[in-house]
Image (cartoon, helix red, strand yellow):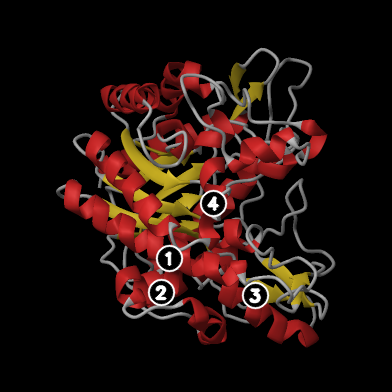
Amino acid sequence: MPEGKAANTAPRSEEPLARPRLDALPPDFTWGVSTSSFQIEGATREDGRGPSVWDTRGAKGLVANGDTGDVACDHYHRYPEDIALMRRLGVTAYRFSVAWPRLLPEGRGAPNAAGLAFYDRLIDALLAAGIEPWLCLYHWDMPQALDDLGGWASRDVVGWFADYAALVAGRYGDRVKRFATFNEPSIFTLFGPGAAFARSDATGPDTFHAAIHHVNLAHGAAVDALRARVPKASIGAIHNVQGCVPSTPADAQAAQCCEAYWDWAFPDPQCLGTYPPLLQAAIAPHMQADDLVRIRRPLDWFGLNHYGPTYIRADAGARLGFNFGDQPQGTPQTPIGWAVRPEGFRDTLLELTRRYRMPIYVTENGLGGHDQPDADGAIVDDARIGYLRDHVGALNAAVAAGADVRGYFVWSLLDNFEWDSGYGVRFGLTYVDYPTQRRIPKASFRWYHDMIAAARGRSHHG
Protein backbone atom coordinates (compact mmCIF):
# COMPACT_ATOMS: atom_id res chain seq x y z
CA MET A 1 0.00 0.00 0.00
CA PRO A 2 1.13 3.64 -0.27
CA GLU A 3 4.29 4.39 1.62
CA GLY A 4 2.86 6.98 3.96
CA LYS A 5 0.38 4.61 5.60
CA ALA A 6 1.02 4.03 9.30
CA ALA A 7 2.53 0.67 10.15
CA ASN A 8 2.75 -1.27 13.38
CA THR A 9 4.87 -4.39 12.97
CA ALA A 10 6.46 -6.77 15.38
CA PRO A 11 10.08 -5.81 16.10
CA ARG A 12 12.66 -7.63 14.04
CA SER A 13 14.87 -10.11 15.80
CA GLU A 14 18.62 -9.86 15.30
CA GLU A 15 18.91 -13.64 15.55
CA PRO A 16 18.21 -15.13 12.09
CA LEU A 17 17.06 -18.47 13.49
CA ALA A 18 14.61 -16.91 15.95
CA ARG A 19 10.92 -17.63 15.50
CA PRO A 20 8.37 -14.86 15.05
CA ARG A 21 5.45 -14.30 17.37
CA LEU A 22 2.54 -16.57 16.48
CA ASP A 23 0.19 -15.73 19.34
CA ALA A 24 -2.49 -14.02 17.22
CA LEU A 25 -2.92 -16.87 14.74
CA PRO A 26 -5.97 -19.14 15.05
CA PRO A 27 -5.43 -22.77 16.13
CA ASP A 28 -6.54 -24.10 12.73
CA PHE A 29 -4.18 -21.83 10.77
CA THR A 30 -3.02 -23.52 7.54
CA TRP A 31 0.73 -23.89 6.86
CA GLY A 32 1.70 -24.90 3.34
CA VAL A 33 4.02 -24.59 0.36
CA SER A 34 3.37 -23.60 -3.25
CA THR A 35 4.67 -24.56 -6.68
CA SER A 36 3.44 -24.33 -10.27
CA SER A 37 3.25 -26.87 -13.07
CA PHE A 38 5.60 -25.36 -15.65
CA GLN A 39 8.18 -24.40 -13.07
CA ILE A 40 8.70 -27.91 -11.69
CA GLU A 41 7.14 -30.66 -13.80
CA GLY A 42 9.39 -31.00 -16.83
CA ALA A 43 8.35 -33.87 -19.12
CA THR A 44 7.15 -31.26 -21.58
CA ARG A 45 7.08 -33.67 -24.52
CA GLU A 46 5.95 -36.81 -22.68
CA ASP A 47 2.64 -38.63 -22.58
CA GLY A 48 0.84 -36.42 -25.07
CA ARG A 49 1.38 -33.02 -23.46
CA GLY A 50 1.05 -30.12 -25.90
CA PRO A 51 3.34 -27.08 -25.99
CA SER A 52 2.63 -24.00 -23.91
CA VAL A 53 3.62 -20.40 -24.56
CA TRP A 54 6.53 -20.90 -22.14
CA ASP A 55 7.83 -23.85 -24.13
CA THR A 56 7.81 -21.56 -27.15
CA ARG A 57 9.55 -18.78 -25.25
CA GLY A 58 12.29 -21.14 -24.11
CA ALA A 59 12.73 -22.62 -27.59
CA LYS A 60 13.26 -19.10 -28.96
CA GLY A 61 16.11 -18.52 -26.50
CA LEU A 62 14.27 -15.73 -24.67
CA VAL A 63 15.06 -17.09 -21.18
CA ALA A 64 18.31 -16.34 -19.34
CA ASN A 65 21.19 -18.71 -20.13
CA GLY A 66 19.09 -20.38 -22.81
CA ASP A 67 17.22 -22.27 -20.07
CA THR A 68 13.98 -24.12 -20.79
CA GLY A 69 11.35 -25.95 -18.76
CA ASP A 70 12.00 -29.23 -20.58
CA VAL A 71 13.23 -30.99 -17.42
CA ALA A 72 12.82 -28.39 -14.66
CA CYS A 73 12.69 -30.34 -11.36
CA ASP A 74 11.45 -33.52 -13.06
CA HIS A 75 8.50 -33.45 -10.68
CA TYR A 76 6.45 -35.38 -13.24
CA HIS A 77 8.54 -38.43 -12.36
CA ARG A 78 9.75 -37.49 -8.87
CA TYR A 79 6.52 -36.30 -7.26
CA PRO A 80 6.58 -39.09 -4.60
CA GLU A 81 9.94 -37.78 -3.38
CA ASP A 82 8.59 -34.23 -3.32
CA ILE A 83 5.51 -35.26 -1.36
CA ALA A 84 7.81 -37.01 1.11
CA LEU A 85 9.62 -33.67 1.53
CA MET A 86 6.31 -31.94 2.28
CA ARG A 87 5.44 -34.56 4.86
CA ARG A 88 8.86 -34.19 6.45
CA LEU A 89 8.37 -30.42 6.48
CA GLY A 90 5.08 -30.78 8.36
CA VAL A 91 2.83 -28.80 6.03
CA THR A 92 -0.83 -29.75 5.78
CA ALA A 93 -1.58 -28.06 2.43
CA TYR A 94 0.06 -27.95 -0.99
CA ARG A 95 -0.86 -25.38 -3.59
CA PHE A 96 0.02 -26.52 -7.11
CA SER A 97 -1.23 -25.80 -10.59
CA VAL A 98 -2.52 -28.07 -13.31
CA ALA A 99 -0.93 -27.74 -16.75
CA TRP A 100 -3.69 -26.88 -19.21
CA PRO A 101 -1.66 -28.24 -22.19
CA ARG A 102 -1.06 -31.52 -20.33
CA LEU A 103 -4.79 -32.12 -20.01
CA LEU A 104 -5.82 -30.57 -23.32
CA PRO A 105 -2.86 -30.56 -25.73
CA GLU A 106 -4.71 -28.24 -28.13
CA GLY A 107 -6.29 -26.27 -25.31
CA ARG A 108 -9.71 -27.66 -26.20
CA GLY A 109 -11.17 -30.81 -27.73
CA ALA A 110 -10.28 -34.33 -26.67
CA PRO A 111 -8.63 -34.66 -23.23
CA ASN A 112 -5.28 -36.38 -22.85
CA ALA A 113 -5.79 -39.52 -20.75
CA ALA A 114 -2.15 -39.75 -19.66
CA GLY A 115 -2.16 -36.16 -18.47
CA LEU A 116 -5.35 -36.65 -16.51
CA ALA A 117 -3.88 -39.76 -14.90
CA PHE A 118 -0.77 -37.89 -13.71
CA TYR A 119 -2.81 -35.54 -11.54
CA ASP A 120 -4.87 -38.49 -10.28
CA ARG A 121 -1.62 -40.01 -9.00
CA LEU A 122 -0.41 -36.74 -7.53
CA ILE A 123 -3.69 -35.95 -5.74
CA ASP A 124 -4.08 -39.49 -4.39
CA ALA A 125 -0.51 -39.45 -3.07
CA LEU A 126 -1.05 -36.08 -1.38
CA LEU A 127 -4.19 -37.30 0.34
CA ALA A 128 -2.45 -40.50 1.45
CA ALA A 129 0.25 -38.30 3.04
CA GLY A 130 -2.32 -36.23 4.92
CA ILE A 131 -1.73 -33.12 2.76
CA GLU A 132 -4.68 -31.18 1.35
CA PRO A 133 -4.41 -30.39 -2.38
CA TRP A 134 -5.07 -26.77 -3.33
CA LEU A 135 -5.49 -26.81 -7.10
CA CYS A 136 -4.87 -23.72 -9.23
CA LEU A 137 -6.29 -23.90 -12.74
CA TYR A 138 -3.89 -21.48 -14.40
CA HIS A 139 -0.33 -20.47 -13.59
CA TRP A 140 0.74 -18.90 -16.88
CA ASP A 141 1.11 -21.96 -19.17
CA MET A 142 -1.39 -21.09 -21.88
CA PRO A 143 -1.55 -23.81 -24.56
CA GLN A 144 0.33 -22.54 -27.60
CA ALA A 145 -2.51 -23.68 -29.86
CA LEU A 146 -4.90 -21.27 -28.12
CA ASP A 147 -2.38 -18.44 -28.04
CA ASP A 148 -2.14 -18.85 -31.82
CA LEU A 149 -5.90 -18.17 -31.94
CA GLY A 150 -5.56 -14.95 -29.95
CA GLY A 151 -5.17 -16.26 -26.42
CA TRP A 152 -6.36 -13.89 -23.71
CA ALA A 153 -6.94 -11.15 -26.26
CA SER A 154 -9.77 -13.21 -27.82
CA ARG A 155 -13.16 -13.29 -26.12
CA ASP A 156 -13.43 -16.93 -27.20
CA VAL A 157 -10.95 -17.75 -24.43
CA VAL A 158 -13.74 -17.41 -21.88
CA GLY A 159 -15.47 -20.51 -23.23
CA TRP A 160 -12.20 -22.40 -23.66
CA PHE A 161 -11.25 -21.76 -20.05
CA ALA A 162 -14.72 -22.64 -18.75
CA ASP A 163 -14.57 -25.99 -20.57
CA TYR A 164 -11.10 -26.65 -19.12
CA ALA A 165 -12.37 -25.79 -15.61
CA ALA A 166 -15.30 -28.16 -16.08
CA LEU A 167 -12.93 -30.95 -17.12
CA VAL A 168 -10.75 -30.42 -14.04
CA ALA A 169 -13.74 -30.19 -11.71
CA GLY A 170 -15.35 -33.33 -13.12
CA ARG A 171 -12.17 -35.34 -12.87
CA TYR A 172 -10.75 -34.25 -9.50
CA GLY A 173 -13.66 -32.67 -7.62
CA ASP A 174 -14.40 -35.90 -5.75
CA ARG A 175 -11.04 -35.46 -3.95
CA VAL A 176 -10.14 -31.77 -4.31
CA LYS A 177 -12.26 -29.10 -2.63
CA ARG A 178 -9.88 -26.11 -2.72
CA PHE A 179 -9.65 -24.41 -6.10
CA ALA A 180 -8.08 -21.20 -7.40
CA THR A 181 -8.99 -19.94 -10.84
CA PHE A 182 -5.88 -17.86 -11.64
CA ASN A 183 -2.46 -17.10 -10.26
CA GLU A 184 -1.39 -13.45 -10.57
CA PRO A 185 -3.43 -12.30 -13.57
CA SER A 186 -1.96 -8.82 -13.18
CA ILE A 187 1.51 -10.16 -13.92
CA PHE A 188 0.78 -12.27 -16.98
CA THR A 189 -1.27 -9.43 -18.49
CA LEU A 190 1.04 -6.51 -17.57
CA PHE A 191 3.98 -8.38 -19.05
CA GLY A 192 2.07 -10.30 -21.69
CA PRO A 193 -0.56 -9.21 -24.24
CA GLY A 194 0.11 -5.64 -25.27
CA ALA A 195 3.04 -5.35 -22.81
CA ALA A 196 2.01 -2.46 -20.57
CA PHE A 197 5.64 -1.77 -19.70
CA ALA A 198 6.63 -1.59 -23.38
CA ARG A 199 7.23 1.61 -25.30
CA SER A 200 4.10 3.42 -26.37
CA ASP A 201 2.43 2.06 -29.51
CA ALA A 202 -1.10 3.23 -30.21
CA THR A 203 -1.27 1.81 -33.73
CA GLY A 204 -2.22 -1.79 -32.94
CA PRO A 205 -5.32 -3.31 -31.37
CA ASP A 206 -5.77 -2.86 -27.63
CA THR A 207 -4.91 -6.42 -26.71
CA PHE A 208 -3.83 -5.46 -23.18
CA HIS A 209 -7.18 -4.14 -21.91
CA ALA A 210 -9.02 -6.84 -23.84
CA ALA A 211 -6.91 -9.47 -22.08
CA ILE A 212 -7.65 -7.97 -18.64
CA HIS A 213 -11.37 -8.13 -19.27
CA HIS A 214 -11.33 -11.61 -20.80
CA VAL A 215 -9.32 -13.03 -17.91
CA ASN A 216 -11.90 -11.61 -15.52
CA LEU A 217 -14.73 -13.10 -17.56
CA ALA A 218 -12.91 -16.44 -17.67
CA HIS A 219 -12.55 -16.32 -13.90
CA GLY A 220 -16.30 -15.89 -13.45
CA ALA A 221 -17.09 -18.66 -15.93
CA ALA A 222 -14.64 -21.01 -14.19
CA VAL A 223 -16.19 -20.30 -10.78
CA ASP A 224 -19.58 -21.25 -12.18
CA ALA A 225 -18.17 -24.44 -13.73
CA LEU A 226 -16.55 -25.45 -10.44
CA ARG A 227 -19.64 -24.69 -8.37
CA ALA A 228 -21.81 -26.75 -10.71
CA ARG A 229 -19.64 -29.84 -10.39
CA VAL A 230 -18.01 -29.77 -6.93
CA PRO A 231 -20.35 -29.68 -3.94
CA LYS A 232 -18.86 -27.69 -1.06
CA ALA A 233 -16.01 -26.40 -3.20
CA SER A 234 -13.96 -23.64 -1.58
CA ILE A 235 -12.99 -21.27 -4.39
CA GLY A 236 -10.73 -18.25 -4.65
CA ALA A 237 -8.36 -16.44 -6.98
CA ILE A 238 -4.74 -15.54 -6.34
CA HIS A 239 -3.58 -11.95 -6.75
CA ASN A 240 -0.18 -10.29 -6.59
CA VAL A 241 -0.75 -7.20 -4.41
CA GLN A 242 2.54 -5.47 -3.73
CA GLY A 243 1.80 -1.80 -3.34
CA CYS A 244 3.15 0.59 -5.98
CA VAL A 245 5.30 3.27 -4.35
CA PRO A 246 6.43 6.47 -6.13
CA SER A 247 10.19 6.70 -6.52
CA THR A 248 9.94 10.48 -5.96
CA PRO A 249 7.05 12.76 -4.99
CA ALA A 250 6.73 13.71 -8.64
CA ASP A 251 5.93 10.07 -9.48
CA ALA A 252 2.81 9.88 -7.28
CA GLN A 253 0.32 9.91 -10.16
CA ALA A 254 2.27 7.27 -12.08
CA ALA A 255 2.35 5.02 -9.00
CA GLN A 256 -1.39 5.47 -8.53
CA CYS A 257 -1.97 4.42 -12.14
CA CYS A 258 0.30 1.40 -11.76
CA GLU A 259 -1.52 0.38 -8.57
CA ALA A 260 -4.86 0.46 -10.38
CA TYR A 261 -3.53 -2.02 -12.93
CA TRP A 262 -1.22 -4.10 -10.77
CA ASP A 263 -3.20 -4.41 -7.54
CA TRP A 264 -6.88 -3.79 -8.30
CA ALA A 265 -7.70 -4.54 -11.98
CA PHE A 266 -8.67 -8.11 -11.15
CA PRO A 267 -9.81 -8.35 -7.52
CA ASP A 268 -12.03 -5.26 -7.74
CA PRO A 269 -14.28 -6.57 -10.54
CA GLN A 270 -14.13 -10.14 -9.19
CA CYS A 271 -14.98 -9.19 -5.60
CA LEU A 272 -16.74 -5.82 -5.86
CA GLY A 273 -18.23 -5.92 -9.36
CA THR A 274 -16.50 -2.78 -10.64
CA TYR A 275 -13.24 -1.79 -12.29
CA PRO A 276 -10.99 0.82 -10.66
CA PRO A 277 -12.02 4.30 -11.93
CA LEU A 278 -8.71 4.80 -13.73
CA LEU A 279 -9.37 1.71 -15.91
CA GLN A 280 -13.04 2.08 -16.72
CA ALA A 281 -12.75 4.13 -19.91
CA ALA A 282 -10.09 1.77 -21.34
CA ILE A 283 -12.10 -1.38 -20.49
CA ALA A 284 -15.42 0.00 -21.75
CA PRO A 285 -14.86 -0.85 -25.47
CA HIS A 286 -14.43 -4.50 -24.52
CA MET A 287 -17.48 -4.66 -22.26
CA GLN A 288 -20.81 -6.27 -23.08
CA ALA A 289 -24.09 -6.16 -21.17
CA ASP A 290 -24.01 -8.07 -17.86
CA ASP A 291 -20.25 -8.71 -18.05
CA LEU A 292 -19.64 -7.40 -14.55
CA VAL A 293 -22.35 -9.71 -13.20
CA ARG A 294 -20.66 -12.63 -14.95
CA ILE A 295 -17.32 -11.68 -13.43
CA ARG A 296 -18.47 -11.14 -9.85
CA ARG A 297 -19.28 -14.65 -8.69
CA PRO A 298 -19.39 -15.69 -5.01
CA LEU A 299 -15.92 -16.52 -3.66
CA ASP A 300 -14.81 -18.16 -0.43
CA TRP A 301 -11.32 -16.75 0.04
CA PHE A 302 -8.77 -14.30 -1.31
CA GLY A 303 -5.32 -15.58 -2.30
CA LEU A 304 -2.49 -13.09 -1.77
CA ASN A 305 1.01 -13.30 -3.26
CA HIS A 306 3.31 -10.72 -1.75
CA TYR A 307 7.07 -10.16 -1.84
CA GLY A 308 7.79 -6.44 -1.38
CA PRO A 309 6.88 -2.99 -2.71
CA THR A 310 7.27 -2.01 -6.36
CA TYR A 311 8.85 1.40 -6.92
CA ILE A 312 7.40 3.31 -9.87
CA ARG A 313 8.42 6.37 -11.87
CA ALA A 314 6.60 8.41 -14.51
CA ASP A 315 7.62 7.52 -18.07
CA ALA A 316 5.92 9.43 -20.87
CA GLY A 317 7.25 6.96 -23.43
CA ALA A 318 5.73 3.90 -21.75
CA ARG A 319 2.34 2.74 -22.93
CA LEU A 320 0.56 3.54 -19.66
CA GLY A 321 2.83 6.36 -18.55
CA PHE A 322 4.73 4.50 -15.84
CA ASN A 323 7.74 2.24 -15.50
CA PHE A 324 9.93 0.74 -12.81
CA GLY A 325 11.73 3.33 -10.72
CA ASP A 326 14.70 3.38 -8.40
CA GLN A 327 14.44 2.25 -4.81
CA PRO A 328 15.38 4.86 -2.20
CA GLN A 329 18.96 4.63 -1.04
CA GLY A 330 19.32 2.24 1.86
CA THR A 331 16.20 0.19 1.02
CA PRO A 332 16.65 -3.36 2.35
CA GLN A 333 16.86 -5.80 -0.55
CA THR A 334 16.83 -9.50 -1.26
CA PRO A 335 19.88 -11.00 -3.01
CA ILE A 336 18.12 -10.48 -6.36
CA GLY A 337 17.41 -6.82 -5.65
CA TRP A 338 13.74 -6.93 -4.63
CA ALA A 339 12.79 -4.42 -1.94
CA VAL A 340 11.99 -5.82 1.50
CA ARG A 341 9.35 -4.12 3.65
CA PRO A 342 7.48 -6.44 6.04
CA GLU A 343 5.39 -3.57 7.39
CA GLY A 344 3.98 -3.15 3.88
CA PHE A 345 2.88 -6.79 4.04
CA ARG A 346 1.04 -6.07 7.29
CA ASP A 347 -0.65 -3.02 5.79
CA THR A 348 -1.68 -4.97 2.69
CA LEU A 349 -3.33 -7.71 4.75
CA LEU A 350 -5.31 -5.12 6.70
CA GLU A 351 -6.29 -3.24 3.53
CA LEU A 352 -7.49 -6.43 1.80
CA THR A 353 -9.57 -7.38 4.84
CA ARG A 354 -11.17 -3.93 4.83
CA ARG A 355 -11.66 -3.81 1.07
CA TYR A 356 -13.02 -7.28 0.32
CA ARG A 357 -14.19 -8.68 3.67
CA MET A 358 -13.28 -12.29 3.04
CA PRO A 359 -10.76 -14.74 4.51
CA ILE A 360 -7.21 -14.32 3.17
CA TYR A 361 -4.69 -17.05 2.45
CA VAL A 362 -1.15 -15.92 1.74
CA THR A 363 -0.43 -18.23 -1.20
CA GLU A 364 3.09 -16.99 -1.97
CA ASN A 365 5.77 -15.29 0.09
CA GLY A 366 9.48 -15.97 -0.08
CA LEU A 367 12.97 -14.85 -1.01
CA GLY A 368 14.92 -15.37 -4.22
CA GLY A 369 18.67 -15.79 -4.01
CA HIS A 370 21.70 -17.52 -5.46
CA ASP A 371 22.05 -20.29 -2.89
CA GLN A 372 24.96 -22.71 -3.16
CA PRO A 373 26.18 -25.54 -0.92
CA ASP A 374 29.03 -24.68 1.42
CA ALA A 375 32.19 -26.78 1.84
CA ASP A 376 30.23 -29.32 3.89
CA GLY A 377 27.42 -29.57 1.34
CA ALA A 378 24.94 -27.62 3.50
CA ILE A 379 22.86 -24.71 2.20
CA VAL A 380 22.79 -22.06 4.91
CA ASP A 381 20.25 -19.50 3.72
CA ASP A 382 20.00 -17.16 6.71
CA ALA A 383 18.74 -14.32 4.49
CA ARG A 384 15.70 -16.40 3.57
CA ILE A 385 15.10 -17.35 7.18
CA GLY A 386 15.25 -13.70 8.22
CA TYR A 387 12.85 -12.73 5.44
CA LEU A 388 10.33 -15.43 6.35
CA ARG A 389 10.63 -14.67 10.06
CA ASP A 390 9.95 -10.97 9.55
CA HIS A 391 7.02 -11.57 7.21
CA VAL A 392 5.34 -14.17 9.41
CA GLY A 393 5.83 -11.73 12.29
CA ALA A 394 4.16 -8.99 10.25
CA LEU A 395 1.33 -11.40 9.39
CA ASN A 396 0.84 -12.14 13.09
CA ALA A 397 0.75 -8.40 13.80
CA ALA A 398 -1.84 -7.93 11.05
CA VAL A 399 -4.07 -10.63 12.53
CA ALA A 400 -3.71 -9.04 15.96
CA ALA A 401 -4.88 -5.76 14.39
CA GLY A 402 -7.93 -7.37 12.76
CA ALA A 403 -6.82 -8.92 9.46
CA ASP A 404 -8.66 -12.14 8.63
CA VAL A 405 -5.74 -14.35 7.56
CA ARG A 406 -6.29 -18.12 7.64
CA GLY A 407 -3.12 -19.58 6.10
CA TYR A 408 0.41 -19.05 4.78
CA PHE A 409 2.17 -20.85 1.93
CA VAL A 410 5.89 -20.37 1.30
CA TRP A 411 7.11 -19.93 -2.25
CA SER A 412 8.53 -22.41 -2.85
CA LEU A 413 9.00 -26.03 -1.85
CA LEU A 414 11.75 -26.41 -4.47
CA ASP A 415 14.21 -24.31 -6.40
CA ASN A 416 12.71 -24.23 -9.89
CA PHE A 417 12.45 -22.65 -13.33
CA GLU A 418 12.04 -18.98 -12.43
CA TRP A 419 10.50 -17.73 -15.70
CA ASP A 420 12.77 -15.34 -17.60
CA SER A 421 15.50 -15.80 -14.98
CA GLY A 422 15.67 -19.51 -15.78
CA TYR A 423 17.51 -21.52 -13.14
CA GLY A 424 19.73 -18.63 -12.03
CA VAL A 425 17.40 -17.61 -9.18
CA ARG A 426 16.45 -19.93 -6.33
CA PHE A 427 13.35 -19.52 -4.13
CA GLY A 428 13.15 -23.01 -2.66
CA LEU A 429 13.21 -24.31 0.88
CA THR A 430 14.85 -27.26 -0.86
CA TYR A 431 17.94 -26.95 -3.04
CA VAL A 432 17.74 -28.74 -6.38
CA ASP A 433 21.02 -29.85 -7.94
CA TYR A 434 19.76 -29.71 -11.51
CA PRO A 435 22.34 -32.02 -13.17
CA THR A 436 21.51 -34.85 -10.74
CA GLN A 437 18.01 -33.71 -9.59
CA ARG A 438 19.13 -34.34 -6.02
CA ARG A 439 16.99 -32.53 -3.43
CA ILE A 440 18.84 -31.03 -0.43
CA PRO A 441 16.76 -29.32 2.28
CA LYS A 442 18.19 -25.91 3.17
CA ALA A 443 18.52 -24.38 6.62
CA SER A 444 15.21 -22.58 5.93
CA PHE A 445 13.52 -25.97 5.49
CA ARG A 446 14.43 -26.92 9.06
CA TRP A 447 13.46 -23.45 10.31
CA TYR A 448 10.01 -23.62 8.68
CA HIS A 449 9.52 -27.15 10.01
CA ASP A 450 10.34 -26.01 13.54
CA MET A 451 8.08 -22.96 13.29
CA ILE A 452 5.14 -25.08 12.12
CA ALA A 453 5.79 -27.51 14.98
CA ALA A 454 5.88 -24.60 17.45
CA ALA A 455 2.62 -23.19 16.07
CA ARG A 456 0.98 -26.58 16.27
CA GLY A 457 2.24 -27.14 19.79
CA ARG A 458 0.96 -23.74 20.87
CA SER A 459 -2.51 -24.46 19.48
CA HIS A 460 -2.60 -27.89 21.14
CA HIS A 461 -1.67 -26.41 24.49
CA GLY A 462 -3.96 -23.41 24.38
Which numbered circle lies on residue 216? 1
User: Disc 3 vs disc 1: which is toward the camera?
Assistant: 1
Q: Pointer 4: what residue?
A: 149
SS for tag 3?
helix
Residues at marks 2 and 1 touching, judged by CB atoms closer than 8 Å = yes
- Choose the circle earlier in sequence order: 1 or 4: 4
> Image quadrant of residue 313?
bottom right
Report the amino acid beneath label 3: Cys
- Choose the circle earlier in sequence order: 2 or 3: 3
- Choose the circle earlier in sequence order: 3 or 1: 1
Left or right: 437, with 175 as reference point = right
Which numbered circle lies on residue 269? 2
For the residues labelled 1 and 4, the Cα–Cα distance comes to 19 Å
User: Disc 1 vs disc 4: which is toward the camera?
Assistant: 4
Residue plotted at (75% across, 55% down): 333
Residues at marks 4 and 3 touching, judged by CB atoms closer than 8 Å = no
Residues at marks 2 and 3 touching, judged by CB atoms closer than 8 Å = no
Report the amino acid beneath label 1: Asn
Left or right: 229, with 289 as reference point = left
- Choose the circle earlier in sequence order: 4 or 3: 4
